[in-house]
């Protein structure tokens, strides 16, 4: 994909105008008209992390972003800081020559960083619409890559442009909409003939991958379906748990991440169950993945949950837990598994189990429990938006937390193209 094709026109609200617009205070407008930016010194930047910290505050700091031909770029939205592999910022919105466009932004101290880091050969960077650097190369005319501009960050008495006001009730409404959208996705699976138990299992498996490994975990749930484990229903609990884990580890091709003594036993058990390798070991990402959150430990966690109820329907079991203990009951079932913890259990219960149960048996009680659930821990998306909003929004419940995610993907939010 070329940088031109990645650019997307974006209608920008008046409230996101330049700082000399109506959202700026009279004092700041006066200083700008007089050409007094009150610049003390240009910020000293010695690392890409420091560069990223400053770029994330672009709405506040208003950097001068200029390319080698003297064209200026206005930062409407710096994008959401990317914690995974790929460009530094996702979904930025920029304006040049009166044209507004969106895409990804990559930061480097030197222009040569683009090729030095191998981005020119990595499809993950095809959506980069601007490389922002501190220093252009002397032969920048011969540079092959996305448009490149330098950024300077003077200290200015300029207020950041005001963003649309977002109230907690607005966030909650967005979160409820996102809940219904997730539930509708599960309903499509059911309508396509997938069993309720398999739908719940697939949803939990995908969630186990969190941000980095969602796709391989979803693929694994289909190559090692829940029905495979019914062979273990008459086994003792610990034996069944190891059997489920062995089947997942073999089908997921993660045996090289397991110590040799256990590896041989896994192969024997997986062979008896008929589990075979369907994924490549390269399908799994370990980039910025905590050891406890890696695929092997997450497979152990889901094996614990599945083995606890092999003699009964998974979906009916979760429904019974909900009817007895509400959303907190579902959280406890997941949190009891090894390598999970309450925070991640909240994520799974609010994003998978409740929407799944609603798809199977819609009820107002499920929505009510969703609104009462505590907020899951903050993540890169919610932290990024909170910084842009000036920490004005702190989700009080799961619905508001989900609303922040919905806002990040909404066309009413700058940076979504």
Image (tube, rainbow, N blue to C red):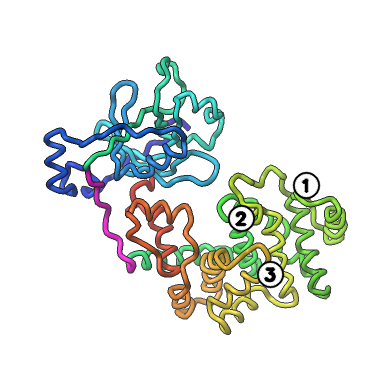
Percent position of residue 243, x then y: 80, 64
Up-down relation of residue 276 to residue 129 (above or below): below
| Residue 2 appearing in the image | yes
Start-end of magenta stretch: 158-169
Q: Quadrant of the C terminus?
A: top left
Q: Residue at x 63, y 56 (%)?
A: 293
Left or right of 32? Residue 163 is right
**Residues packed near mark 3 inside 10 Å, few (<14), some (14 to 19) or many (20 plus):** many
Q: Are marks 3 and 2 in contact (CB under 8 Å)?
A: no
Residue 165 drawn in magenta: yes
Closest to the observer: 51 or 276?
Answer: 51
- Distance between the alpha carbons at the discs numbered 1 and 2: 18 Å
Left or right of 15? Residue 142 is right
Closest to the observer: 401 or 181?
Answer: 401
Residue designated by label 2: 209
Q: Which numbered dot is residue 256?
A: 1
- Distance between the alpha carbons at the discs numbered 3 and 2: 16 Å
Say which element carries label 3.
Answer: helix
Residue 240 drawn in magenta: no
Say which element carries label 2.
Answer: loop
Percent position of residue 67, x then y: 33, 25
Left or right of 340? Residue 156 is left
Where residue 41 sits, quadrant-wise, is top left
- Distance between the alpha carbons at the discs numbered 1 and 3: 24 Å
Q: Residue at x 48, y 32 (%)?
A: 1
Q: Are marks 1 and 2 in contact (CB under 8 Å)?
A: no
Labels 3 and 2: the sequence-earlier one: 2
Residue designated by label 3: 305
Up-down relation of residue 104 to residue 399 (above or below): above
Q: Residue at x 48, y 38 (%)?
A: 87
């Amino acid at each position: 994909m070329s940088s031109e094709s990645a650019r997307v026109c974006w209608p920008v609200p008046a409230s996101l105008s330049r700082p000399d617009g109506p959202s700026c205070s009279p004092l700041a407008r006066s200083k700008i008209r007089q050409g007094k930016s009150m610049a003390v010194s240009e910020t000293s930047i010695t690392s890409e992390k420091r560069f990223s910290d400053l770029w994330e505050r672009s709405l506040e700091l208003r950097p001068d972003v200029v390319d080698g031909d003297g064209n200026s770029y206005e930062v409407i939205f710096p994008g959401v800081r990317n914690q995974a592999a790929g460009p530094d910022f996702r979904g930025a919105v920029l304006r040049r020559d009166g044209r507004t466009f969106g895409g990804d932004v990559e930061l480097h101290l030197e222009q040569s960083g683009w090729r030095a880091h191998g981005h020119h050969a990595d499809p993950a960077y095809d959506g980069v619409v601007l490389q922002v650097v501190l220093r252009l190369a002397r032969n920048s005319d011969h540079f092959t890559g996305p448009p490149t501009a330098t950024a300077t960050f003077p200290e200015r008495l300029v207020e950041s442009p005001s963003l649309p006001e977002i109230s907690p009730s607005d966030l909650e409404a967005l979160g409820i909409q996102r809940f219904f959208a997730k539930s509708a996705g599960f309903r499509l699976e059911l309508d396509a003939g997938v069993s309720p138990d398999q739908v719940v299992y697939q949803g939990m498996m995908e969630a186990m991958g969190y941000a980095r490994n969602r796709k391989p975990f979803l693929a694994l749930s289909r190559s090692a379906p829940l029905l495979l484990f019914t062979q273990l229903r008459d086994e003792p609990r610990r034996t069944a748990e190891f059997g489920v884990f062995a089947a997942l580890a073999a089908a997921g091709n993660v045996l090289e991440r397991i110590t040799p003594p256990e590896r041989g036993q896994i192969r024997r058990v997986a062979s008896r169950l008929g589990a075979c390798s369907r994924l490549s070991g390269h399908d799994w990402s370990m980039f910025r993945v905590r050891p406890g959150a890696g695929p092997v430990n997450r497979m152990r966690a889901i094996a614990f949950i599945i083995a606890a109820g092999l003699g009964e329907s998974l979906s009916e079991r979760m429904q019974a837990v909900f009817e007895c203990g509400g959303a907190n009951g579902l959280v406890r079932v997941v949190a009891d598994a090894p390598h999970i913890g309450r925070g991640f259990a909240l994520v799974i219960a609010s994003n998978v189990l409740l929407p799944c149960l609603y798809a199977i048996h819609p009820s107002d009680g499920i929505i009510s429990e969703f609104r009462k659930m505590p907020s899951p821990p903050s993540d890169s998306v919610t932290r990024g938006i909170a910084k842009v909003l000036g920490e004005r929004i702190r989700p009080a419940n799961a619905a508001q937390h989900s609303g922040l995610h919905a806002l990040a993907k909404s066309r009413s939010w700058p940076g979504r193209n």
